[in-house]
Amino acid sequence: MIFLAMFLAQAATQPAPLTGVWSVGETRSCDSGEAWVFTADGYYVEVDLPSSPIGAVGAFIDKGNAIEYTHSHMPFASADTPQVRRSYTITNRSADRIDALNYKGEKRFFHKCPLDALKKPEGKH
């Protein structure tokens, strides 16, 4: 019983999972616009919803109060150089929204979208 209570207390303090599709901007826009797709293995891709090609990629670490990431734009001219790690400092976090400050101190907002917000491009079956 004590173990269960400790597990539930720890689970309540853990941030919502980052994996999935997140629209970027002050308002939630899961139909169109910039989005980051975070994968369970620590990578992300930047796309324009609903079905654009990948515009940037990187690795990320979810630190709970920050998202540390690398960022490389297509066509990856910087692939053969060490990647700079940047960070979003999280100021507010819920299951469907993250408010953060980027490495320049500018406000950024992420809104959780359903997985089907990312569509397969036409003709790609």
Image (cartoon, rainbow, N blue to C red):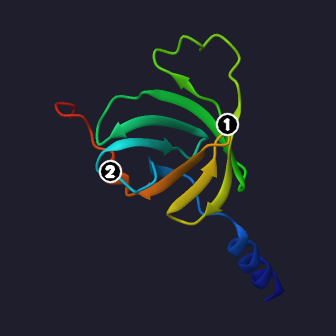
Residue at (46, 14) in percent of width and height:
75
Nearer to us in this view, 68 or 101: 101
Q: Is residue 68 above or below residue 98?
A: above
Q: Give the number of marks.
A: 2
Q: Is residue 50 left or right of residue 73?
A: left
Mark 2 or 1: the one toward you: 1
Q: Are marks 2 and 1 in contact (CB under 8 Å)?
A: no
Q: Can you give x and y, in whole percent of width and height, for residue 58 in the image?
A: 58, 31
Residue 33 picture quarter: top left
In which quadrant of the rendered image does the C terminus lie? top left
Q: Secondary structure at mark 1?
A: loop
Looking at the image, which residue sits at the far bottom?
Answer: 1
Nearer to us in this view, 109 or 14: 109
Of the numbered discs 2 and 1, the one sitting upstream in the chain is: 1
Three-letter code, disc 2 = Ala
Q: Is residue 80 left or right of residue 2?
A: left
Nearer to us in this view, 14 or 22: 22
Q: Secondary structure at mark 2?
A: helix
Residue at (64, 30) in percent of width and height:
70
Q: Is residue 54 above or below residue 109?
A: above
Residue position for label 2 = 117
Q: Is residue 72 left or right of residue 12?
A: left
Residue at (68, 22) in percent of width and height:
83
Distance between mark 2 and mark 1 Cα atoms: 29 Å
Q: Is residue 76 above or below residue 23?
A: above
Nearer to us in this view, 12 or 112: 112
Task: Mark 1: give few (<14), some (14-19) or many (20+) Cα within 10 Å.
Answer: few
Three-letter code, disc 1 = Lys
Q: Can you give x and y, in whole percent of width and height, for residue 62 in the image?
A: 67, 49
Residue 77 picture quarter: top right
Residue position for label 1 = 104
Q: Can you give x and y, in whole percent of width and height, for residue 88 in the image?
A: 66, 44
